[in-house]
Image (tube, rainbow, N blue to C red):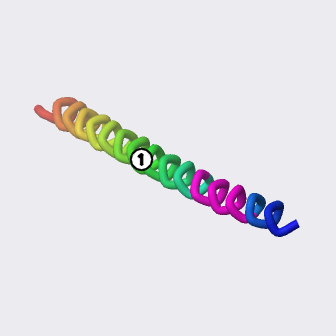
Amino acid sequence: MVKMCAKKSTWLALHHVTEETRSVKTAEKDALQLKKDKDKASWTSLADLRAVALYRAP
């Protein structure tokens, strides 16, 4: 019975660590995606501003 409990607690600890690692990796991926989206957004807005400036130019 004690052996079984030890195994289960070890498994739970390992499971918790893998879950935490997975969530950290997911968070990193999300942050990277957000950065990419932000970069893309800034480039597109720059292009839009340039287009508007050219369109308004006399």
From this viewpoint, which residue is outermost toward the right?
Answer: 1
Q: Residue furthest left?
A: 58
> What residue is rendered at 56% in x and 53% in y?
23
Is 45 situated left or right of 31 in this image? left
Stretch of the chain drawn in magenta? 9-18
User: What x and y, as percent, mark residue 21?
Assistant: 52, 53
Residue 19 vertical position relative to residue 29 in the rendered view, above or below: below
Q: Residue at x 11, y 32 (%)?
A: 58
Q: Is residue 4 left or right of residue 21?
A: right
Q: Is residue 48 above or below residue 20?
A: above
What residue do we see at 31% from left, 35% from top?
44
Viewer-proximal residue among 10 and 42? 10
Farthest residue to the bottom: give it: 2
Q: Is residue 8 magenta?
A: no
Q: Position of residue 17 (x, y in %)?
A: 58, 58
Q: Quadrant of residue 5?
A: bottom right
Q: Is residue 41 above or below residue 58?
A: below
* Secondary structure category for the residue under label 1: helix
Q: Position of residue 55 (x, y in %)?
A: 22, 30
Residue topped by disc 1:
34
Give the x, y percent position of residue 25. Answer: 48, 48
Amino acid carrying mark 1 in the image = Leu
Q: Quadrant of the N terminus?
A: bottom right
The rendered magenta stretch, by its main secondary structure, is classed as helix
